[in-house]
Image (tube, grey):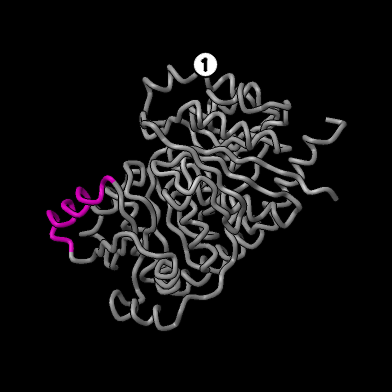
Amino acid sequence: MKRLRALHIYRTYFPETHGGVQEAIRQIAMATREEGVDATIFTLAHDPRPEVLQAPEGRVRRARSLFEIASCDFGSAAAVRRCRDEATRADVIHIHYPWPFADLMLPFVRPNGQPLVVTYHSDVVRQGALDKLYAPLRACLLGAADRIVATSPAYARTSPVLARHAAKTRYIPLALADCAGSDAALRERWRQEVGDDFFLFVGVLRYYKGLHFLIEALPSIGAKIVIVGDGPLAKDLQAQAAGLGAANVRFLGCLPDADKLALLELCRGVVFPSHLRSEAFGVTLLEGARAGKPLISCEIGTGTSWVNLHDETGLVVPPADPAALAAAINRLHADEALCRRLGAGARARWQAHFRPPVVGRAYADLYRELVSPAH
C-alpha cells in the first residue's frame, strides 16, 4: 500500500513549547506512521533555528513568529511560503484548530486542492469579542474542510460551532502511547520526598484548569495534593494556598517526563479540576488512566467526562465546586478498594479506546478515504 504524506499545521510545537495540542499532534503523527502515513509538522517559533528538525514522529518545519494576539502566533509572508513548500509534497493537509493564522494561510497552502482535515480541539471560550471578529474566517476554514474531527462525541454534541457542520464531523479521540515503567531509583527518591498517598495534578497553570477551586478546598481535604506544572497563575495559586495556611499542598513546578511518570505511579489518584470548555479533552486524564489510577474531573460537557466515566474510571463532580472536589478526594483517600476498582477501569478504558493503534488506524482510514478516486 502506498505511503501517504500528511502535513500538520499548528501555531507552536516542540521543543519550543509544550502543551496538550502539541502532544496530541505528536501522538497522531506517531500512530499514523505505523499505518503508512509520513508526517510533517509546520509551525512557528520565536527562534526557528534550525529551520528543519527531524523528530521521531516526523519532520518539523519552522518559520519565525512575528507577534502574538490572544496567545495566537502570526508569521510573515516567508512563513506562508515555507508552509506552501511543504504542502506541495503533501497528500493531505491537516490543520489543528484553533489557529487564525492557519485560516489566513489556507488559500495559499493548498496548491493541489488536497483534501483538508481539521481537528477541532476546542471552542474559543474566553476571547468573546475577538471570536466575533474571527467567526467569518473560521466559517471559511470549516466550510472548506472535507472532514472535521472532534476529539470526543461529547464535544461534537455540545459545541455550537460543530453543530453547524454535523454532516462532515467525525469523532476520533486523542491517543497516548504505552511506556515502560519509571526508573526505580527516581521513583524512590520521589517517595522519600512526597510519599505515596497523594493526589496529583499535572498541567499548565492556566485560568480554565480550576486550580483555584482545588486550592480553596484544601482545608477540607484530608490528603496531600501535589501540583506539577508552571504557568501564568503559578504565583497567584501559591499565594492563595499560603493565605489559607494550607500545609497539604506541594508545588513542584515543571518536571521532566521521567519525574512525572514516577509521580503518576506513586500517587493515589489524579485530580483534574478544569471548569471551563477550554479544557476539551485532558491528556493528563489519559496519563492517569494509562497508569491505572482513579480519576477525578468535572462535568463541563467536553471530552473529560468521556475519558473519565463516573464510577467506572473515577469520579465526576460539578465544576467550580470546592466542596465537591474535597468530597471526591476524601472518598478515594479513605477507600483503597474503590481506588483499585476505578484505577483498573481507567486502565481498561485507555487500552480499549486511546492507544495509538486504535487512533492511528482511524486517522489513516480517514486520510485514505479522502484521497481515494471515489471521494
Decide whether the magenta segment is chiefly helix, strand or loop: helix
x, y percent for residue 36: 76, 52
Percent of width and height locating residue 286: 52, 57
Residue indicated by mark 1? 136
> In the displayed structure, does residue 31 sit left or right of residue 263?
right
> To which quarter of the image does residue 325 belong?
bottom left
Q: In this view of the protein, which residue sits in the foreground, 66 or 201?
A: 66
Q: Is residue 95 magenta?
A: no
What is the quadrant of residue 140 in the picture? Answer: top right
Find residue 72 and report its horizontal and vertical position in percent.
41, 33
Q: How many marks?
A: 1
Q: Identify which residue, 135 or 247, lies in the foreground.
A: 135
Q: Is residue 367 left or right of residue 152?
A: right
Name the element at disc 1.
helix
Question: Which residues are drawn in magenta?
Answer: 232-246
Residue at point 45% right, 53% down?
15
Q: Residue at x 65, y 44 (%)?
A: 172
Report the amino acid beneath label 1: Pro
